[in-house]
Image (cartoon, grey):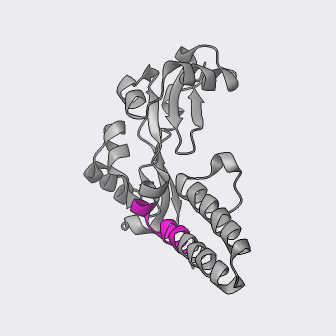
Amino acid sequence: MGKREVGELTILDFIVSIMIAEFAAMAVQEQSLIQGMVPILILACIQIGLAYVSLKSNRLRDVLDGEPTMIIQNGKIDEEAMRTQRYNFDDLLQHLRTQGISNFTDVEYAVLEPSGDLSVIKKERGDDPNDIVYPLPMIIDGDIQHDHLQQIGLDAGKLMDKLQARGYTNVKSIALCVSKKNGALIVDEKDER
């Protein structure tokens, strides 16, 4: 589970926590302490194993934790994405107000995170609008995020051409890659191990 507050727990972490508490309550009533502790240890091992595997696998992480969803893109609210996430305008406006934004037109991008938080990138006033960074990464931990590329209007072939022009031949060597609105890439290489 790591160092997270209760509100930040994934649904799996929350369920495992409740089950461990239930098994612990049953263990108190058991005659043998070992019989009561075995289910707790098995459940803890399963949880630790799933957490480890989800660190290594983007697909499993997406299944267990969910994916971020773009709610506002280029200053326009995506109502279909809101419906899909069962996220209403009251929720959107409340999250914007808590971040000090009174008007949704001041927002360039808003991303609904798997934790339920809303990450907001405001429109820049007076700055070069091409310096704005798209909030959804194109490469995470060496894996191309095809759905994010589609939202940006880019395909994997064009991305690879841009990366090769900058000297990157293997996507697996890239930890994180994001794009500015003008198409410039920001690349963070994986640490050597």
- Most foreground residue, 65 or 144: 65
- Most foreground residue, 156 or 16: 16
Mark yes or no: residue 1 visible: no
**Where's the N terminus, which quadrant?**
bottom right
Task: Name the spot of residue 56 as percent of width and height, x first.
Answer: 48, 70
- Residue 100, above or below 24: above
- Residue 110, above or below 35: above
Task: Name the spot of residue 115 as percent of width and height, x first.
Answer: 57, 44
Image check: 169 left or right of 25?
A: left
Identify the residue shown where x is 62% and y is 22%: 94
Task: Name the spot of residue 129 as percent of width and height, x first.
Answer: 51, 26
- Residue 103, above or below 30: above
- Most foreground residue, 94 or 47: 47
Residue 149 lies in quadrant: top left
**Where's the C terminus, which quadrant?**
bottom right
| Residue 141 part of the magenta-drawn span | no
Task: Report the magenta stretch's main SS.
Answer: helix
| Residue 53 part of the magenta-drawn span | yes
Identify the residue shown where x is 37% and y is 68%: 170
Please give the count of numbered marks on the rendered protein.
Answer: 0
- Residue 29, above or below 159: below
- Most foreground residue, 138 or 69: 69
Task: Name the spot of residue 103 as percent of width and height, x first.
Answer: 59, 13
Look at the image and give the residue range highlighted in magenta: 49-60
Mark yes or no: residue 109 visible: yes
Identify the residue shown where x is 67% and y is 63%: 21
